[in-house]
């Protein structure tokens, strides 16, 4: 989805949504040779850039969000809403769609 | 959806519905040349014009709406109900369908 | 749906149902020329004729209806149950299906 | 659905079910001429013959039924369970499927 | 579904399930002539043989069952789980699937 | 589903799951003649081998399981997860999928 | 799903998710002969490597997770999200998707 945003930093996710940026696979082999991008598998890892205030439970209270900006997370293969700022692509997921936190 | 409305201002969304107007992409390049509209990508940004009083939770209490008139928001690629007033098109979304607030 | 009703006024919607009549587009141009009806776009506006007592929340209490007889409302493009009284057509919607109130 | 019932009066609907009999359209014109039945449109009106004790809400309490025996109601075009007693056909609807009460 | 049961009486339905046996249509006309079984319409009536202890509401309390052994009931045209004991066929329905009680 | 289990006894069902073993139909006629297995109808009866601790209701309390190890039960024709231990096949059902207890 | 993870240990499942590694079937017969891997059936057994903090019930409280790291579990034939770390494949399941614990 195209936007006219100057910076992704101006995006504040709503409810239980999480803004992430996919981590790109290394296009350089261990021995320093650069690979053509089409031969590199897309990673299911992403960095959390911003999180919403949380969705509501059945009694109208906000549910705690599982991750925070700066976290590295495992994202599902499908789903999420793509957002484009200039040439960069980002994704918005709902909190419960994220699979795991990466502590590395 | 065609209407006989004279002004979009007379529309008061019901429950958790949000009335927005899509922001048009610039049809002028940086150097001042005008582009034909068909070559300009549609933006996923919209301005909030009016918000409903909020939907009900399971106990009959109103749920807080996430945005307010004047807010700029990221809208999903699909969905929403189109409304036409004269030549202008607007959309009604439900609060939880909006993806993010834009602070720019 | 055909009925043998003499007057639409004898119809009392049940639960959260709303009885409306679609507002017809003007078949006369600004300069007073009448247009053939087939060239006139159907409007998504309707007048509320009667409202039900409200549906139940999960605890068995009635939920407040968002509109009242006499209100003008924006109705969705699809859905609703058609009712025919003589040559006139009316529609029954559920309260949450109505999109907005028109204050004009 | 065929039954061996001698009288529809022996049928007591369960939970939120409503037993109705469709009202037949007049096969006689205003001037007294009888029309062949196939040219007469089926009406969406029915008479309530019996009602169930009510379904349960999430806390196990019975929900009030919206209509009572003798009421005339507007029924939806599709749905309902047909019941046949001799040559007569009846229908069972759930309470929330009925559209409106007819006060005429 | 085939079983090795000697008697249907050993079957105790679980939760909100109801064990019924369909009532067979008379294969003898009023004047005493026997009809071939294939020309006789299947009835939607059944006798309740046994009922379960009731399902649970959202708070873990048992919901009351609407019928009791010995009741005659109207069953839906489709659905239910067939059970075969010797040559006889029975059906298990959930309580809310039964349409009406027959008091005749 | 293949497993490397030495004994089915080492399987402890989770939540509301029930481990059962289908009861085999007699392949010997009343007069003592053995029938080829392919001519014998599969039975819908099973023996309960182990039960889970129970699922959770909406308030986080465990729901009581309807059966106990040793019970004979009627199982649905379809569904359940097959488990293979050596040459023997077992099934896991959820508590509410079991149809009836067999007291014989 | 490809990742750039150096170790699966850095993965911390979110909410009610469970990280498991499928147990490989023995490719050696009892008499010590190695079988080609394609002739060996895939096992439905897995070892729990890490568990999430638990999902939320309708009142916003965490639900207890049924298994703990080190447990051996029976996993369903289909479903789960695959994760690849180097050449090794792992799966993420939701707690209620796991079928049974293996005590052997």
Image (spheres, coloured by chain):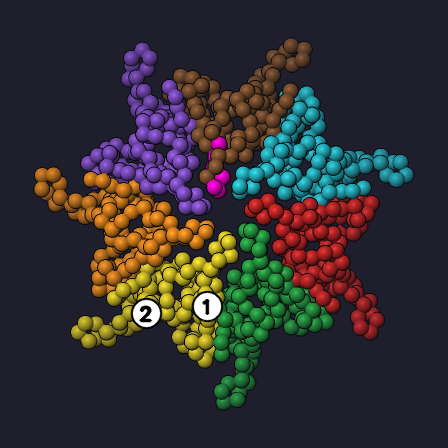
Chain colours: A green, B red, C cyan, D brown, E purple, F orange, G yellow
> Residue drawn 23% across and 59% down?
F9
Left or right: where A63 falls relative to E103? right
Q: Is residue F94 visible?
A: yes
> Residue drawn 75% across and 55% down?
B69
- Residue D73 location, x and y as percent? 58, 25
Please identify the quarter of the rendering in which residue D12 is found.
Answer: top left
- Residue F2 location, x and y as percent? 29, 62
> Residue drawn 65% across and 35% down?
C18
Image vertical order of residue D32 relative to residue F31, above or below: above
Which residue range is magenta in the image?
D54-59
Mark 2 secondary-structure assignment: loop
Upstream in sequence: badge 2 or badge 1: 1
Mark linked to residue G13:
1
> Residue drawn 67% across and 59% down?
B75
Crowd class of label 2 (few under 14; some 14 to 19; many from 20; radius 10 Å): some
Q: Which residue is mark 2?
A: G23
The residue marked by circle 2 belongs to what chain? Answer: G
Image vertical order of residue F18 relative to residue B25, above or below: above
- Residue C21 location, x and y as percent? 71, 33
């Amino acid at each position: 989805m195209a936007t006219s945003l100057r910076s992704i930093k101006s995006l504040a996710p709503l409810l239980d949504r999480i803004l992430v940026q996919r981590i790109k696979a290394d296009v350089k082999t261990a021995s320093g040779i650069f690979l053509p991008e089409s031969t590199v598998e897309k990673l299911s890892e992403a960095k959390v850039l911003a999180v919403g205030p949380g969705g509501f439970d059945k009694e109208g209270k906000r549910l705690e969000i599982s991750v925070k900006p700066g976290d590295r997370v495992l994202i599902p293969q499908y789903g999420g809403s793509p957002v484009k700022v200039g040439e960069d692509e980002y994704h918005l997921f709902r909190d419960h769609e994220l699979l795991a936190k990466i502590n590395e």
